[in-house]
Image (spheres, rainbow, N blue to C red):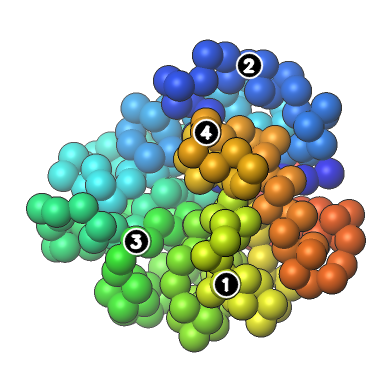
Amino acid sequence: MLIDTHTHITDKRYNDHKQIIADMDKDNLSRMIVVGYDYKNSLQGLEIAKQNEKVYCSLGLHPSSAAIYNEKKSLEHLELSKHPKVIAIGEIGLDYHYPDFDKNQQAKACIGQLEIAHKANLPVIIHMRDCDLDMKNLLKANKHLLQKGGVMHCYSGSLESAYEYIDLGFYISFTGVITYKNAKKSLDIVKNIPLDKILIETDCPYLSPEPFRGQLNYPKNVVYVAKQIAEVLDISLDEVARITADNAYRLFDKLK
C-alpha cells in the first residue's frame, strides 16, 4: 500500500476529511501525514491524527507565514511534539515566489524551527520555492540541527542540488507535477537519485496529477505519482509502493 507523506486535508475546500480517511483502505493508502503550515492549522492536524489510527501529522510554520513567527508558540510545538502522532516539524523553509517577502524574517523562522526539531529529535519537512541557493546555505550552516534529516517536499530544484540535499540527510519527495508534460527535469532526477531517497506525496489540495490537473487534489491520487515513477524506472507499481513506504518509515521513525 501507498503512503501519502504530505497532505493538507484540513483545507476548507474538502467537505469532509472524515470520508477521505474512511476511504483509505479502498484507495490503497496505508498511512497519511497531515502537514501543518501555521500554528492553528498544526493543532487541527494533530487533532485529526489523534482520532485516526492511520493518520499522522507534523507541526510547523510555512515561510509565507514567517511574519507571525513566535518563539513561545514554537516552544509549544516542542511540547506537543512528544505526542506519538507527531512525526516531524514542518512545513518550514524559504519561499521567494511572491512579492514583498522578507528574507531575514523567513530565515529566522526557519532556523528557530530547525532548533525545535533538533530538541524534539524529529526530522523536518522543508518547503523551498525560488530560493535554492539560500536554502542550501541555510541548511548547511545549520547542519548541526539536522541529526534526524528531513525531506525536500515537492522538490523542484536541480539534480545537482538534490545530491547536495541528500548529502545533508534529506529525502527527495515528488508530487503530481512529475505527471505533467513539462516534467523532464523532475523525471531525470527520479532516474538519477538513489531509490532509497525517494518519497511520494500529493500536497493535496494542490498539484493534482494528470488526468486531474487543475482540479481539487486528494490523497488517493498519490498512486499517479507512484505509477509515473514505476514507468520511468521500469519497475512495478508494487515495488514503488514498497520502496517509498520503507523510505517513509525510515525517515519518520515514529510512523507505525
Q: Secondary structure at mark 2?
A: helix
Q: Secondary structure at mark 1?
A: helix
List the residue tagged with mark 3. Answer: 129
Instruction: Specify which label sits upstream in the sequence, 1 or 2.
Output: 2
In the picture shown, does residue 135 fall above or below 237? below
Q: Quadrant of the N terminus?
A: top right
Q: Secondary structure at mark 4?
A: loop
Q: Nearer the viewer, mark 4 or mark 3?
A: 4
Residue kind at label 2, given as amino acid type: Lys
Instruction: Specify which label sits upstream in the sequence, 1 or 4.
Output: 1
Q: CA distance from mark 4 to mark 3?
A: 22 Å
- When asked about the image quadrant of residue 110, the answer is bottom left
- When asked about the image quadrant of residue 33, the answer is top right
Q: Nearer the viewer, mark 3 or mark 2?
A: 3
Q: Say which mark, if any, is on residue 18.
A: 2
In the picture shown, does residue 12 fall above or below 241? above
Residue kind at label 4, given as amino acid type: Gln
x and y percent of residue 128 in the render? 37, 61
Q: Say which mark, if any, is on residue 215.
A: 4
Q: Residues within 10 Å of mark 1 (few under 14, many from 20)?
A: few
Q: Is residue 234 left or right of residue 154?
A: right
Q: Is residue 194 left or right of residue 233?
A: left
Residue kind at label 3, given as amino acid type: Arg
In the picture shown, does residue 150 fall above or below 68? below
Q: Quadrant of the C terminus?
A: top right
